[in-house]
Image (cartoon, grey):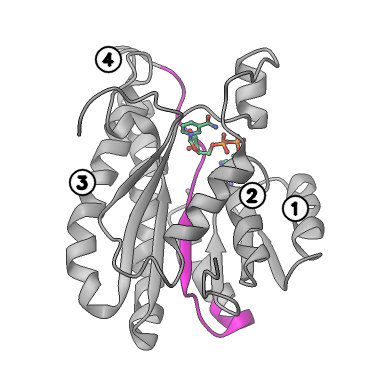
Amino acid sequence: MDLGISGRVALVTASSKGLGRASAMALAEEGCKVVVCARGEEALRAAEKELAEHTEVLAIAEDVTDADAPRRLVEATVERFGSVDILVANAGGPPATRALEFDDDQLGTALNNNLTTSLRLVREAVPHMRDRHWGRVCCITSFSIKQPIPTLALSNTARTALWAWIKTAAQELFPDGITVNTAAPGHHATDRMRQLGGGDTSGMGDPADFGKVVAFLCSQPANFVTGTAVQVDGGATTGLL
Ligand code: NAD
Protein backbone atom coordinates (compact mmCIF):
# COMPACT_ATOMS: atom_id res chain seq x y z
CA MET A 1 0.00 0.00 0.00
CA ASP A 2 1.28 3.46 -0.87
CA LEU A 3 0.99 5.58 2.28
CA GLY A 4 1.23 8.75 0.19
CA ILE A 5 3.60 10.61 2.50
CA SER A 6 6.85 10.56 0.55
CA GLY A 7 8.53 13.95 0.93
CA ARG A 8 6.56 14.86 4.06
CA VAL A 9 8.52 16.17 7.06
CA ALA A 10 8.21 14.14 10.26
CA LEU A 11 9.36 15.15 13.74
CA VAL A 12 9.61 12.12 16.02
CA THR A 13 10.65 12.81 19.62
CA ALA A 14 12.48 10.50 22.05
CA SER A 15 13.61 8.50 19.06
CA SER A 16 17.16 7.20 19.39
CA LYS A 17 15.84 3.81 20.57
CA GLY A 18 12.73 1.73 20.99
CA LEU A 19 9.29 2.67 19.71
CA GLY A 20 10.27 6.23 18.77
CA ARG A 21 13.18 5.04 16.67
CA ALA A 22 11.05 2.36 15.02
CA SER A 23 8.42 4.98 14.17
CA ALA A 24 11.08 7.26 12.67
CA MET A 25 12.41 4.33 10.63
CA ALA A 26 8.97 3.38 9.30
CA LEU A 27 8.36 6.98 8.24
CA ALA A 28 11.82 7.19 6.67
CA GLU A 29 11.10 4.02 4.70
CA GLU A 30 7.97 5.75 3.39
CA GLY A 31 10.12 8.59 2.09
CA CYS A 32 9.53 11.15 4.84
CA LYS A 33 12.34 13.47 5.86
CA VAL A 34 12.79 12.86 9.57
CA VAL A 35 13.90 14.78 12.61
CA VAL A 36 14.83 12.71 15.64
CA CYS A 37 15.83 13.71 19.16
CA ALA A 38 17.15 12.19 22.36
CA ARG A 39 19.19 13.36 25.32
CA GLY A 40 22.24 11.12 24.84
CA GLU A 41 24.51 11.70 21.83
CA GLU A 42 25.76 8.15 21.30
CA ALA A 43 22.48 6.39 20.58
CA LEU A 44 21.23 9.45 18.71
CA ARG A 45 24.17 9.37 16.29
CA ALA A 46 23.64 5.62 15.76
CA ALA A 47 19.97 6.24 14.91
CA GLU A 48 20.91 9.14 12.64
CA LYS A 49 23.34 6.93 10.72
CA GLU A 50 20.77 4.17 10.24
CA LEU A 51 18.03 6.57 9.16
CA ALA A 52 20.36 8.38 6.77
CA GLU A 53 20.53 5.19 4.70
CA HIS A 54 16.88 5.84 3.79
CA THR A 55 16.24 9.57 3.88
CA GLU A 56 17.36 13.06 4.84
CA VAL A 57 17.65 13.23 8.60
CA LEU A 58 18.26 15.86 11.26
CA ALA A 59 19.26 14.56 14.71
CA ILE A 60 19.02 16.94 17.67
CA ALA A 61 20.36 16.30 21.16
CA GLU A 62 17.53 17.59 23.31
CA ASP A 63 15.55 16.70 26.43
CA VAL A 64 12.03 16.86 24.99
CA THR A 65 10.54 17.30 28.48
CA ASP A 66 12.29 20.64 28.94
CA ALA A 67 9.57 23.34 28.75
CA ASP A 68 11.19 25.14 25.82
CA ALA A 69 12.35 22.06 23.90
CA PRO A 70 9.19 21.64 21.77
CA ARG A 71 9.60 25.19 20.44
CA ARG A 72 13.27 24.61 19.68
CA LEU A 73 12.58 21.26 17.99
CA VAL A 74 9.81 22.59 15.77
CA GLU A 75 11.85 25.68 14.86
CA ALA A 76 14.86 23.54 13.94
CA THR A 77 12.65 21.23 11.85
CA VAL A 78 11.11 24.10 9.92
CA GLU A 79 14.48 25.79 9.46
CA ARG A 80 16.01 22.63 7.99
CA PHE A 81 13.12 21.18 5.99
CA GLY A 82 10.66 24.08 5.55
CA SER A 83 7.70 22.57 7.42
CA VAL A 84 6.53 20.02 9.94
CA ASP A 85 3.80 17.81 8.51
CA ILE A 86 3.91 14.85 10.87
CA LEU A 87 4.49 14.85 14.62
CA VAL A 88 5.06 11.67 16.58
CA ALA A 89 5.07 12.78 20.21
CA ASN A 90 6.95 10.38 22.46
CA ALA A 91 8.87 10.56 25.75
CA GLY A 92 10.22 8.10 28.29
CA GLY A 93 7.70 6.60 30.71
CA PRO A 94 7.46 7.28 34.47
CA PRO A 95 8.68 4.88 37.16
CA ALA A 96 6.39 2.16 38.50
CA THR A 97 4.30 3.24 41.50
CA ARG A 98 1.16 2.09 43.22
CA ALA A 99 -1.79 4.48 43.68
CA LEU A 100 -0.53 6.31 46.79
CA GLU A 101 3.19 5.74 46.56
CA PHE A 102 4.40 8.97 44.96
CA ASP A 103 5.09 12.52 46.09
CA ASP A 104 4.16 15.80 44.41
CA ASP A 105 7.48 16.05 42.58
CA GLN A 106 7.07 12.62 41.00
CA LEU A 107 3.49 13.43 40.04
CA GLY A 108 4.57 16.74 38.52
CA THR A 109 7.36 15.08 36.53
CA ALA A 110 5.08 12.37 35.18
CA LEU A 111 2.44 14.89 34.13
CA ASN A 112 5.10 17.09 32.52
CA ASN A 113 6.76 14.25 30.62
CA ASN A 114 3.75 12.20 29.55
CA LEU A 115 1.05 14.85 29.19
CA THR A 116 2.26 18.46 29.00
CA THR A 117 5.22 17.73 26.71
CA SER A 118 2.91 16.31 24.04
CA LEU A 119 0.55 19.28 24.32
CA ARG A 120 3.49 21.68 23.94
CA LEU A 121 4.74 19.78 20.88
CA VAL A 122 1.33 19.88 19.20
CA ARG A 123 0.87 23.56 20.05
CA GLU A 124 4.18 24.38 18.35
CA ALA A 125 3.62 22.16 15.31
CA VAL A 126 -0.01 22.93 14.49
CA PRO A 127 0.47 26.45 13.04
CA HIS A 128 2.78 24.95 10.39
CA MET A 129 0.28 22.18 9.63
CA ARG A 130 -2.58 24.68 9.40
CA ASP A 131 -0.59 26.72 6.86
CA ARG A 132 -0.63 23.70 4.52
CA HIS A 133 -4.05 22.40 5.55
CA TRP A 134 -2.44 19.02 6.20
CA GLY A 135 -1.07 17.50 9.37
CA ARG A 136 -0.74 14.25 11.28
CA VAL A 137 -0.21 13.93 15.03
CA CYS A 138 0.35 10.56 16.64
CA CYS A 139 1.09 10.40 20.36
CA ILE A 140 2.71 7.25 21.70
CA THR A 141 0.91 6.37 24.94
CA SER A 142 0.26 2.91 26.39
CA PHE A 143 -2.46 0.26 26.44
CA SER A 144 -3.02 1.53 30.00
CA ILE A 145 -5.26 4.28 28.51
CA LYS A 146 -7.91 1.56 28.15
CA GLN A 147 -6.95 -0.71 31.04
CA PRO A 148 -5.01 0.84 33.93
CA ILE A 149 -2.02 -1.19 35.10
CA PRO A 150 -2.05 -1.52 38.94
CA THR A 151 1.68 -0.86 39.38
CA LEU A 152 1.84 2.11 37.02
CA ALA A 153 -0.32 4.73 38.74
CA LEU A 154 1.61 7.72 37.36
CA SER A 155 1.62 6.39 33.82
CA ASN A 156 -2.10 5.53 33.96
CA THR A 157 -2.93 9.03 35.20
CA ALA A 158 -0.83 11.10 32.78
CA ARG A 159 -1.67 9.01 29.72
CA THR A 160 -5.44 8.88 30.22
CA ALA A 161 -5.39 12.67 30.55
CA LEU A 162 -3.49 12.86 27.26
CA TRP A 163 -6.00 10.51 25.64
CA ALA A 164 -8.86 12.77 26.77
CA TRP A 165 -7.03 15.76 25.34
CA ILE A 166 -6.42 13.95 22.03
CA LYS A 167 -10.16 13.37 21.71
CA THR A 168 -10.78 17.07 22.29
CA ALA A 169 -8.05 18.27 19.92
CA ALA A 170 -9.09 15.84 17.16
CA GLN A 171 -12.51 17.47 16.80
CA GLU A 172 -11.02 20.95 16.82
CA LEU A 173 -8.26 20.28 14.30
CA PHE A 174 -10.04 18.07 11.76
CA PRO A 175 -11.47 21.03 9.79
CA ASP A 176 -7.86 22.18 9.30
CA GLY A 177 -6.88 18.87 7.68
CA ILE A 178 -5.06 17.71 10.81
CA THR A 179 -5.64 14.35 12.45
CA VAL A 180 -4.73 13.53 16.06
CA ASN A 181 -4.47 9.92 17.20
CA THR A 182 -2.63 7.72 19.62
CA ALA A 183 -0.89 4.41 19.09
CA ALA A 184 -1.23 2.59 22.41
CA PRO A 185 1.48 -0.05 22.82
CA GLY A 186 1.39 -3.14 24.94
CA HIS A 187 4.66 -4.86 25.74
CA HIS A 188 7.24 -4.52 22.98
CA ALA A 189 10.76 -5.85 22.82
CA THR A 190 12.63 -2.57 23.30
CA ASP A 191 15.88 -2.14 25.23
CA ARG A 192 13.90 -0.87 28.18
CA MET A 193 11.70 -3.95 28.29
CA ARG A 194 14.76 -6.18 27.89
CA GLN A 195 16.25 -4.53 30.97
CA LEU A 196 13.02 -4.73 32.97
CA GLY A 197 12.36 -8.34 31.96
CA GLY A 198 15.90 -9.58 32.43
CA GLY A 199 16.30 -10.09 28.69
CA ASP A 200 13.22 -12.27 28.17
CA THR A 201 11.07 -10.71 25.46
CA SER A 202 9.09 -13.80 24.46
CA GLY A 203 5.53 -12.94 23.45
CA MET A 204 6.29 -9.25 23.10
CA GLY A 205 5.59 -7.13 20.02
CA ASP A 206 8.22 -6.18 17.46
CA PRO A 207 8.95 -2.41 17.62
CA ALA A 208 9.37 -2.35 13.81
CA ASP A 209 5.75 -3.51 13.41
CA PHE A 210 4.60 -0.87 15.91
CA GLY A 211 6.44 1.77 13.87
CA LYS A 212 4.51 0.74 10.78
CA VAL A 213 1.20 1.19 12.61
CA VAL A 214 2.33 4.71 13.55
CA ALA A 215 3.29 5.36 9.92
CA PHE A 216 -0.19 4.25 8.81
CA LEU A 217 -1.85 6.63 11.28
CA CYS A 218 0.33 9.39 9.80
CA SER A 219 -0.48 8.44 6.22
CA GLN A 220 -2.58 10.00 3.49
CA PRO A 221 -5.23 7.23 3.45
CA ALA A 222 -5.69 7.66 7.22
CA ASN A 223 -7.05 11.17 6.58
CA PHE A 224 -10.48 10.27 8.07
CA VAL A 225 -8.99 8.49 11.09
CA THR A 226 -8.84 10.93 13.99
CA GLY A 227 -9.51 10.92 17.73
CA THR A 228 -8.69 7.23 17.67
CA ALA A 229 -6.61 5.04 19.96
CA VAL A 230 -5.12 2.10 18.12
CA GLN A 231 -4.22 -0.65 20.56
CA VAL A 232 -1.04 -2.45 19.52
CA ASP A 233 -0.98 -4.86 22.43
CA GLY A 234 -1.41 -8.44 21.27
CA GLY A 235 -4.88 -8.52 22.81
CA ALA A 236 -3.70 -7.57 26.31
CA THR A 237 -6.63 -5.18 26.73
CA THR A 238 -9.63 -7.27 27.65
CA GLY A 239 -12.34 -4.58 28.04
CA LEU A 240 -14.87 -3.75 25.32
CA LEU A 241 -14.14 -0.02 24.92
P1 NAD B 1 12.98 3.08 25.37
O1 NAD B 1 13.55 3.35 26.73
O2 NAD B 1 13.36 1.84 24.66
O3 NAD B 1 13.31 4.32 24.41
C1 NAD B 1 13.03 5.61 24.82
C2 NAD B 1 13.66 6.58 23.86
O4 NAD B 1 13.31 7.87 24.29
C3 NAD B 1 15.20 6.54 23.87
O5 NAD B 1 15.66 6.87 22.59
C4 NAD B 1 15.56 7.63 24.87
O6 NAD B 1 16.84 8.19 24.60
C5 NAD B 1 14.48 8.64 24.55
N1 NAD B 1 14.13 9.52 25.65
C6 NAD B 1 13.67 9.16 26.87
N2 NAD B 1 13.43 10.27 27.60
C7 NAD B 1 13.74 11.33 26.80
C8 NAD B 1 13.70 12.73 26.99
N3 NAD B 1 13.31 13.26 28.15
N4 NAD B 1 14.08 13.54 25.97
C9 NAD B 1 14.47 13.01 24.79
N5 NAD B 1 14.54 11.69 24.56
C10 NAD B 1 14.18 10.86 25.56
O7 NAD B 1 11.40 3.20 25.57
P2 NAD B 1 10.25 2.53 24.69
O8 NAD B 1 10.07 1.15 25.18
O9 NAD B 1 10.49 2.78 23.25
O10 NAD B 1 8.97 3.36 25.17
C11 NAD B 1 8.56 4.57 24.57
C12 NAD B 1 7.30 5.06 25.28
O11 NAD B 1 6.27 4.08 25.15
C13 NAD B 1 7.52 5.28 26.79
O12 NAD B 1 6.74 6.36 27.23
C14 NAD B 1 7.02 3.98 27.37
O13 NAD B 1 6.64 4.11 28.72
C15 NAD B 1 5.84 3.69 26.46
N6 NAD B 1 5.44 2.29 26.45
C16 NAD B 1 6.34 1.35 26.07
C17 NAD B 1 5.94 0.01 26.09
C18 NAD B 1 6.91 -1.07 25.67
O14 NAD B 1 6.60 -2.24 25.86
N7 NAD B 1 8.08 -0.77 25.12
C19 NAD B 1 4.66 -0.33 26.49
C20 NAD B 1 3.76 0.67 26.85
C21 NAD B 1 4.18 1.99 26.83
Label 2 CB less than 8 angstroms from ligand 1? yes
Of the numbered discs 4 and 3, the one sitting upstream in the chain is 4
Helix, strand or loop at label 3? It is helix
Q: Residue 213, position in %: x, y?
A: 49, 51
Q: Residue at x 21, y 77 (%)?
A: 175
Of the numbered discs 1 and 2, the one sitting upstream in the chain is 2
Helix, strand or loop at label 4? It is loop
Label 3 CB less than 8 angstroms from ligand 1? no
Looking at this view, name the residue that lies furthest to the front: 1
Of the numbered discs 2 and 4, the one sitting upstream in the chain is 2
Q: Which residue is mark 1?
A: 47
Q: Residue at x 61, y 36 (%)?
A: 206
Q: Nearer the viewer, mark 4 or mark 3?
A: 3
Of the numbered discs 2 and 3, the one sitting upstream in the chain is 2
Helix, strand or loop at label 1? It is helix
Label 1 CB less than 8 angstroms from ligand 1? yes
Do the residues bearing badges 1 and 2 touch, measured as CB atoms within 8 Å?
yes
Q: Residue 209, position in %: x, y?
A: 58, 44
Residue 94 among magenta residues: yes
Q: Residue 75, position in %: x, y?
A: 52, 75
Q: Which residue is mark 4?
A: 99
Q: Which residue is mark 2?
A: 21
Is residue 90 placed above or below 122 in the rendered structure? above
Region rendered in magenta: 78-96
Disc 3: CA contacts within 10 A as few (<14), some (14-19) or many (>=20): few
Task: Identify which residue, 76 or 1, lies in the foreground.
Answer: 1
Q: Which residue is mark 3?
A: 164
